[in-house]
Amino acid sequence: MDDHNYTLGEIKMAKYRIEIDRDTCIGCGVAPAICPEIYMLDPNDGKNRITDKYLIKLDEHKAIGEIPEELYECAKAGADSCPVSAIRIIKIE
Ligand code: SF4
């Protein structure tokens, strides 16, 4: 009998919250082009939002999402390229 006690549940990955200020977004399409896994232009108003997979909240003013650590670089590349700095990324875990 193997009595090793592995506690896999203790390995926690970081998570990040993404906030898009949709009032500031000018719908240039740069963030969705750079990171289509997270960002997309909403067909209703042409402004950036979070893809369904990671979306938590969406209204005309704000889009909020949550992404796992492995998508951080993608999220950040999009945020850094935004000409109006409309994307914020906050570490939550
Ligand atoms: S890069 Fe900025 S302005 Fe352009 S679509 Fe994304 S959030 Fe909007």
Image (tube, rainbow, N blue to C red):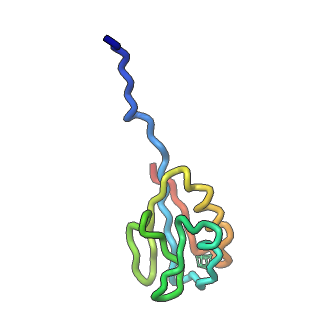
Residue 52 in percent (x, y) is at 42, 69
- Classify residue 63 by image quadrant: bottom left
Q: How many marks?
A: 0
Left or right, 28 with reference to 39: right
Q: Quadrant of ligand 1?
A: bottom right
- Look at 62% across and 61% down and name the residue there: 76
Residue 34 in percent (x, y) is at 65, 68
* In this view, 91 is above or below 83: above
The quadrant of the picture occupied by the N terminus is top left
- Look at 49% across and 47% down and name the residue there: 14
The residue sitting at the front extreme is 1
**Observer-nearest residue: 8 or 14?**
8
Residue 23 in percent (x, y) is at 51, 84
The residue sitting at the bottom extreme is 45
Residue 44 in percent (x, y) is at 45, 88
* In this view, 72 is above or below 8: below
Left or right, 63 with reference to 31: left
Left or right, 30 with reference to 10: right
The residue sitting at the top extreme is 1
* In this view, 28 is above or below 54: below
- Look at 44% across and 63% down and name the residue there: 54
- Look at 51% across and 54% down and name the residue there: 91
The residue sitting at the left extreme is 1
- Classify residue 72 by image quadrant: bottom right
